[in-house]
């Protein structure tokens, strides 16, 4: 922002120096000179105090203002990046959505399922009356 103001002041200085008797010269040079020459000592003191206070206040606010401007600039950059990414990805998203809209119903519908033949259950094994095989059958330790 300060570079822009400096460029504008430089541009005005070039315009004034090119035409010293013109309208811009009268507004920027002669009018302030007349006002300053008409000021009294009291008005100059009040103006100086106000200028010093304004400079001091601007120095106090400058760091906070820098953070606000930095956050604002970052927000604009992020907005630009997100819009750019969104616009670059939108055609691909539309193509993906169209392809999914065509293939998903086919995948869900698929082939009709063939009914499976039911297998007959095996009869449960009958427990043995042999006491030696009972421990081995249940998974217990077997001693020889």
Image (cartoon, grey):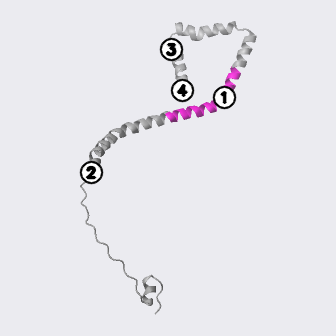
State whether residue 14 is above or below residue 139. above
Residue behind mark 3: 15
Mark 2–mark 1 CB contact (< 8 Å): no
| Viewer-closest of 41 and 76 | 76
State whether residue 87 is above or below residue 8. below
Whether residue 66 sits left or right of residue 142 in the image: it is: right
State whether residue 15 is above or below residue 56. above
Residue 101 is situated, as x and y percent measured from the top left of the image, at 29, 44
Residue behind mark 2: 109
Looking at marks 3 and 1 on the same chain, the residue that comes earlier in the sequence is marked by: 3
Residue behind mark 4: 3
Q: Residue 6 is drawn in which quadrant?
A: top right
Q: Residue 127 is drawn in which quadrant?
A: bottom left
| Magenta segment main secondary structure | helix
Looking at marks 2 and 3 on the same chain, the residue that comes earlier in the sequence is marked by: 3
Whether residue 6 sits left or right of residue 92 in the image: it is: right
Mark 2–mark 3 CB contact (< 8 Å): no
Secondary structure state at the residue bearing disc 3: helix
Secondary structure state at the residue bearing disc 4: helix
Q: Which mark is residue 59?
A: 1
CA distance for labels 2 and 3: 78 Å
Q: Which residues are magenta?
A: 51-75
- Residue at image point 49% right, 33% down: 76
CA distance for labels 2 and 1: 71 Å
The answer to if 142 sits in the magenta stretch is no
């Amino acid at each position: 922002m300060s570079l822009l103001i400096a460029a504008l002041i430089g541009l005005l200085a070039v315009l004034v120096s090119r035409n010293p008797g013109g309208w811009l010269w009268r507004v920027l040079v002669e009018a302030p000179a007349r006002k300053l020459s008409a000021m009294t000592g009291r008005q100059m003191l009040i103006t100086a105090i106000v200028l010093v206070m304004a400079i001091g206040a601007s120095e106090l606010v400058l760091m906070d203002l820098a953070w606000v401007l930095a956050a604002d600039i970052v927000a604009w950059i992020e907005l630009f990046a997100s819009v750019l990414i969104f616009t670059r990805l939108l055609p691909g998203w539309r193509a993906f959505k169209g392809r999914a809209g065509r293939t998903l119903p086919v995948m869900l519908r698929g082939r009709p399922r063939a009914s499976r033949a039911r297998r007959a259950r095996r009869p449960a094994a009958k427990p043995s009356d042999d006491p030696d095989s009972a421990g081995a059958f249940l998974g217990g330790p077997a001693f020889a």
